[in-house]
Amino acid sequence: MKIARFSRIGFILAAAGSAVGLGNIWKFPYITGENGGGAFVFVYLITVLMIGFTLMIAEMLIGYMGRRDSVTNFETLAPRQKSRWKYGGYIGITGLIIMIFYSPVIGWTLHFVLLSFSSLPSSVEIAQKSFTSFISIDLWSQIFYHTLVFIFVTTVVTRGIKGGIEKLNFILMPVLIVTISAMFLYALSLNGFSQAWDFMFAPDWSKLTSASLVTAVGHAFFTLSVGMATIMTYSASLPKESNLVRSSLIVIALDTGIALIAGLTLFTFLYEYGATPSAGPGLVFISLPTVFYEMGFLGHLFSFVFFVALASAGLTSAVSLIEPMVQYLIDRFSYSRLKASLSSGLFFYVFGLVAILSISEEYGSMLTFGSKNFFDWADFITASVMLPIGGLIMSIFVGYVMEKERVASHLKAQLGAVYPLWYFSLRYIVPVALFVVILNLVGLLKL
Ligand code: PHE
């Protein structure tokens, strides 16, 4: 039995806290940079609206109606008893696998929070060197930060939906919004802003490849936290009579708004100081710290503020990543919350250690399988494979398996005239788009 529920605003903050994460501030700017800017942003925005919005409502509905862990939700909402659909609920494991690489990356941000006041790199070469040596040689520091993340996340989740997760979001989400907005306002006053604007919003279609299309769709899922039972698990604790449509619109607006603002701010800083937007994953950890160094004292302050914001965004997502498994262990195996949180935490902690070793100089080759090391596999399997599959399962479940009348009785009033459109998108557009993504992926894998 569930006792604690989110408050209305608590739910929105927590769902937005889950959605807004490293994906928005670290990943979105660098994949936009790598994929040529405007055209990529356009595809991403269309995907968020057409696929993300449709699916987020479907996923919320499963949680809201099921009220339990993801496996039980699929089981009880399927029209036939003992349905195999319950296996769809196992998609909730995805979050723990994401945490294998997500936690070490939050660790990097903590490292940079400290660096902000001691030694920012004075040139890109130095930044490159010190970052590479940090992630490939300095294992103990990384393990230290990863341990901090493990302790923090497990403690918060142990305290439950209300006393842990909601409270954390009540503190960190305002921190994140204020810090990012302050930096954005400063960016507005710089000359680099117009270049950044053009880069992000003037599409150059020739830069759009089929691989960047797939990346855009994959990222739309990742950034909205849909397709892996996170939003579903949070929605199981929604207050009665909640408006799912309004909640998803607010969450999507916050998530997209923060990604665009973070992207514009970063690119402005980079253009202003002559760095390039296409620097890849090192954009935030290599190019940006050098820019902060060049800004002088203000730069140190900005660096601190920026990495605190990034760490906050990461931590509020991290708690949401392990909650589906925690809820599953509590509901299905009667674990206490403490035991459920600890075992889920230990899972990502141990495999996270392996991920850290897999990017190191010393153990890297031992932990590389095929074309990728363990760290990259965890990223690839979740963001590119499991999330689209999870999305496909949910769209088919709500679109074809659940009784039409039940779905309509919850959503018709909330969606109004848009309802038929939403239902059509859920039954046809979303599954077809996801199917294409998955097929493409199989093709990509064969290459
Ligand atoms: N949405 C988060 C981000 O953008 C990551 C995440 C994915 C969190 C899936 C929960 C579930 O960083």
Image (cartoon, rainbow, N blue to C red):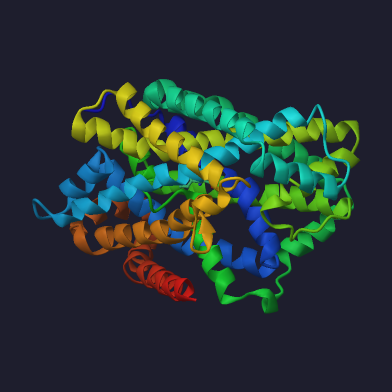
Residue 44 appears in which quarter of the rendering? Answer: bottom right
Locate residue 405, reporting x and y percent. Answer: 19, 57
Which quadrant of the structure image shows residue 349? Answer: top left
Viewer can see residue 217: yes
Total labels drawn: 0
Please tell me which residue is depicted at 71% across the width and 34% down the height of the picture: 112
Q: From the viewer's perspective, tell me whether residue 134 is left or right of residue 11.
A: right
State the residue in front, 401 or 96: 96
Q: Nearer the viewer, residue 236 or 276?
A: 276
Q: Is residue 20 visible?
A: no
Instruction: Note whether 76 is above or below 204 in the view shown.
Output: above
Taking the view exactly as shown, the residue that stands out farthest to the bottom is 206
- The image position of residue 88, as x and y in percent, is 26, 54
Residue at point 22%, 49% (across, down) = 74
Q: Nearer the viewer, residue 426 or 122?
A: 122
The image shows residue 418, relative to residue 148, as above or below, that is: below
Pick the residue in front: 411 or 269.
269
Residue that appears at 80% across and 27% down: 117
Residue at the farthest left position:
81
**Residue 294 located left or right of residue 168:** right
Q: Where is the N terminus found, in terms of image quarters?
A: top left
Residue at 25% from the left image edge and 37% from the top image edge? 68
Residue 25 horizontal/vertical position (percent):
64, 46
Residue 266: give x, y in percent of width and height. Answer: 75, 49
Drawn side of residue 128 relative to residue 247, left or right? right
